[in-house]
């Protein structure tokens, strides 16, 4: 009889081979994941102008020229949409108008670092991280996604196969490790197929930080540039001017990686699946987080948060027990619970089958009513979070549905 480790190793090999086969079928080695083009109506809504305004720019030869398909419909890539943003921002009447077209950080605005966390798997943490990062990029922000989870699902959603495309010293671990192999974060950041969205990928190498930190602590590493909870923030400092928002997808555990991510954050988003078992688990998570943050604060950590919010995920409005759990959370935490939940949707599940998000798959590839319901729910959540960012920068808030 084979030993348990041999059996596990055999299963890992079989699964790895199958994943490689599936990946090769979906994304052949000669191809790269690309983002679809957007209709002129979608482009106009993203930019915040009318479709006729885009047509005028096109007829006048200003800005990038759209692709015209057989039925005369105009389509723009995200790169072209961002070029139009720059063009319109330059011709805007004042700074405020320019920021609506190109809503980047202004002088004096601090980098927004949002840690998406929960130490129970299945709470929708990675799906939330990927959709939020892409939404902000679609809105014109310069976004950096950091995959802090050794399982690297965030990286997979953004077009990488971590097993085969992320080599040694190519994850965040390279920028936060304790030895002489440490690398600047700028050397690890990768551009993605999604214009305006860059990525620090993850893989199993990140677990080294969990193993090495206790050794570093026992060796007496206490200097400000050595303590584990400051390392993610220190790694971000040299590249802070290149981005407006950083989205950190934390591991589903409360270890050194998660603590480092939370200590680097200016905002914390806790994803919550509204089931009693998940709520009980979250209670333990919050108690442990409180105790650990108190310890690192005493050790010198600066915990300056613009916001802490709970996001209800995989919510089924017709499910009576879920509705009661949500009401309980709102009663306990008040405004700390986001008004809009992330509704469970077959549209998002269908998109996930091909490692895509709802923003990538496009309305024409799904039942339109199903897609529209999911897209409306997503936008409501994302506008709320975007308004938290805008509020931290002292800007006016966006109304839901406002381009």
Image (cartoon, rainbow, N blue to C red):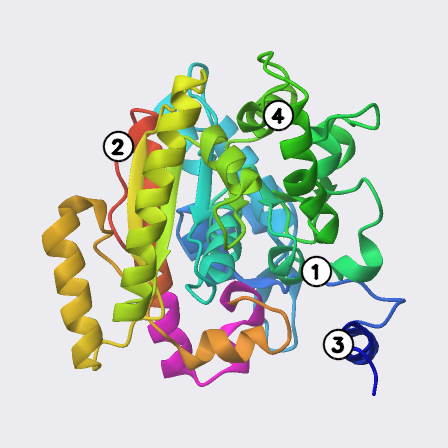
The span picked out in magenta is 358-375
320 relative to 313, above or below: below
The 10 Å Cα crowd at callout 3, few under 14, some 14 to 19, many 20 or more, is: few
Asked if marks 3 and 1 touch (Cβ < 8 Å), the reply is: no
The 10 Å Cα crowd at callout 4, few under 14, some 14 to 19, many 20 or more, is: few
Q: Nearer the viewer, mark 1 or mark 4?
A: 4
**Which image quadrant is residue 16 in?**
bottom right
Q: Nearer the viewer, mark 4 or mark 2?
A: 4
**Which image quadrant is residue 320 in?**
bottom left
Q: Position of residue 234 (x, y in %)?
A: 60, 21
Asked if marks 1 and 2 touch (Cβ < 8 Å), the reply is: no
As for residue 370 lying within the magenta part, the answer is yes
Q: Residue at label 4?
A: 217
Numbered label attached to residue 4:
3
Q: Earlier in the sequence, mark 2 or mark 3?
A: 3
Q: Residue at label 1?
A: 159
Q: Position of residue 144 (x, y in %)?
A: 59, 39
Q: Residue at label 2?
A: 396
Q: Position of residue 208 (x, y in %)?
A: 72, 42
Q: Earlier in the sequence, mark 3 or mark 1?
A: 3
Q: Earlier in the sequence, mark 1 or mark 2?
A: 1
Q: Nearer the viewer, residue 350 or 314?
A: 314
């Amino acid at each position: 009889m084979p030993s348990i480790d041999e059996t596990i190793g055999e299963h890992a090999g079989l699964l790895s081979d199958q994943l490689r086969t599936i990946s090769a079928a979906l994304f052949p080695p000669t191809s790269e994941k690309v983002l679809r083009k957007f209709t002129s109506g979608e482009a106009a809504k993203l930019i915040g102008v009318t479709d006729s305004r885009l047509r005028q720019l096109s007829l006048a030869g200003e800005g990038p020229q759209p692709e015209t398909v057989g039925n005369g419909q105009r389509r723009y890539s995200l790169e072209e949409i961002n070029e139009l943003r720059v063009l319109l921002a330059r011709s805007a009447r004042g700074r405020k108008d320019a920021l609506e077209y190109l809503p980047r950080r202004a002088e004096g605005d601090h980098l927004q670092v949002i840690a998406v966390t929960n130490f129970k798997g299945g709470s929708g943490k990675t799906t939330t991280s990927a959709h939020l990062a892409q939404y902000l990029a679609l809105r014109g922000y310069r976004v950096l996604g950091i995959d802090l989870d050794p399982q690297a699902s965030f990286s997979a959603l953004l077009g990488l196969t971590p097993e085969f495309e992320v080599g040694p010293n190519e994850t965040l671990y390279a920028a936060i490790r304790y030895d002489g192999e440490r690398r600047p974060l700028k050397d690890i950041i990768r551009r993605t197929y999604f214009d305006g969205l860059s990525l620090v990928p993850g893989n199993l190498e990140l677990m080294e930080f969990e193993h090495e930190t206790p050794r570093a602590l026992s060796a007496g590493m206490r200097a400000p540039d050595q303590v584990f909870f400051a390392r993610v923030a220190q790694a971000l400092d040299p590249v802070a001017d290149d981005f407006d928002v950083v989205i950190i997808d934390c591991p589903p555990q409360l270890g050194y990686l998660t603590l480092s991510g939370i200590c680097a954050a200016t905002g914390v988003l806790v994803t919550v699946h509204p089931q009693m078992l998940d709520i009980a688990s979250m209670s333990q998570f919050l108690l442990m987080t409180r105790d650990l943050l108190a310890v690192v604060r005493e050790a010198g950590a600066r915990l300056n948060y613009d916001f802490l919010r709970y996001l209800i995920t995989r919510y089924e409005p017709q499910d009576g027990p879920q509705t009661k759990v949500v009401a309980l959370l709102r009663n306990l935490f008040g405004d700390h619970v986001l008004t809009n939940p992330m509704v469970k949707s077959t549209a998002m599940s269908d998109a996930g089958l091909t490692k895509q998000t709802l923003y990538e798959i496009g309305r024409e590839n799904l039942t339109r009513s199903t897609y529209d319901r999911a897209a409306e729910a997503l936008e409501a959540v994302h506008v709320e979070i975007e308004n938290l960012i805008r509020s931290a920068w002292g800007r006016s808030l966006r109304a839901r549905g406002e381009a």
